[in-house]
Amino acid sequence: MAQTARTVVIHEFGGPEVLRLEDRPVGEPGPGQVRIRHKACGLNFIDIYQRSGLYPNELPLTMGMEAAGEIEAVGEGVDHLKPGDRAAYAAMPPGAYAEARVMPAAQVCPLPDEIGFDTAAAMMLKGLTVQYLFHRTTPLQRGDSVLFHAAAGGVGLIACQWARSEGITLIGTAGSDEKCKLALDHGAAHCINYRTQDFAGEVRRLTGGKGVDAVMDSVGADTFEGSLDCLKPLGMMISFGNASGPVPPFSLAVLAQKGSLRITRPTLFTHIADHAVCMEMAARLFDKVRSGDVKIRIDQRFALDRVADAHRALEARKTTGSTILEP
Ligand code: NDP
């Protein structure tokens, strides 16, 4: 039976105005694929990089990397899902801003009954990111300290709670005093308003001059240099995003001068590329949410046809926590 689904597509890179809602055909799943009918879709900053063309993709491009819904059909060789199952994912290729889609099954995870569709759509990409940052990037132990930028955002509020639940001291930064309060309420030990304070100086002061074990920096251009000054000798710089623009080229020698620092530029999609690892990471994330250690805050909701407004709000730093689109 031929069917169509309202789907957000771009035909050119640019501002929020290039986002278009179109009826697109949705066929039957091929081998290794599923057809999923979305109940909620997640909004992520990576969607902005894809829309603007900062992260290259071919056009036309369907948008969105995270959603939750019900499996309608499965293709040959898919044995971890069946029609009628509740499911959620963070996955490539983009195409999650849609009523329904056909997609590879490997990263689509069966969703426990206790976790609602909205919550799942608000946490898969962001929560799996926090998990790989804390557990798969550098060894972090109870008692270690981390500087986490944009701590009141979608990834940020999950990170604050995750750190608290693991006994890791998280120093957050955020762009207003209200956002700092939110980060503190969610488990940050300290939060620095980096629009009014010199965050590197504050981190030095808060750590008695020692610095932190790791920095998790998704702000990029505006914070990169200051972040390096917050690290202990042998500390780990994790540059995982560019909300303020890409990090400019820099000399590796700087890492030696600042104390034999380590640096990595990871992406979630390397970590979840393997099906078994992805399922294991999702199970751990679901446990964190079911235990109450991590609560997912949905602070903004937009109908799918208001996707451009959702992008504008995220880019203008007007959002906190997670944002979902309602198909
Ligand atoms: P957020 O909800 O955190 O929104 C981004 C936040 O960045 C803003 O709210 C703002 O917070 C801060 N920010 C600082 N400077 C700017 C600027 N110039 N323009 C806009 N925002 C700015 O988004 P997400 O939770 O979706 O993602 C957080 C970051 O993590 C993004 O950079 C994203 O790309 C990255 N990411 C990377 C992944 C990876 O695997 N590499 C996976 C998932 C996310 P404030 O006002 O407090 O400064």
Image (cartoon, grey):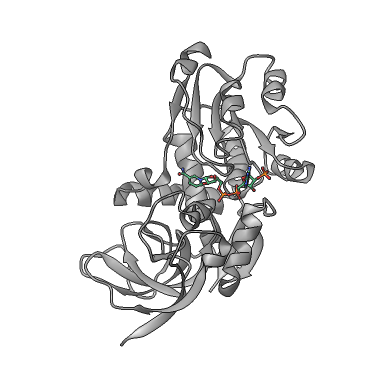
Left or right of residue 168: residue 299: right
Viewer-proximal residue among 58 and 179 = 58
Residue 75, quarter of the rendered image: bottom left
Position in image of residue 172 (x %, y %): 66, 35
Q: Quadrant of the N terminus?
A: bottom left
- Residue 145 in sight in this render: no
Asked if residue 319 is positioned above or below residue 16 in the image, the reply reads above
Asked if residue 225 is positioned above or below residue 116 in the image, the reply reads above
- Residue 159 in sight in this render: yes
Asked if residue 319 is positioned above or below residue 160 in the image, the reply reads below
Viewer-proximal residue among 142 and 277 = 277
Residue 11, quarter of the rendered image: bottom left
* Residue located at (78% from left, 41% from top): 177
Please identify the residue farthest to the bottom as the structure is shown: 1
Position in image of residue 142 (x %, y %): 55, 27
Left or right of residue 211: residue 190: right
Viewer-proximal residue among 221 and 47 = 221
Q: Number of labelled discs?
A: 0
Left or right of residue 306: residue 58: left
* Residue located at (61% from left, 55% from top): 322
* Residue located at (61% from left, 25% from top): 226
Position in image of residue 83 (x %, y %): 34, 75
* Residue located at (45% from left, 58% from top): 65
Position in image of residue 189 (x %, y %): 69, 32
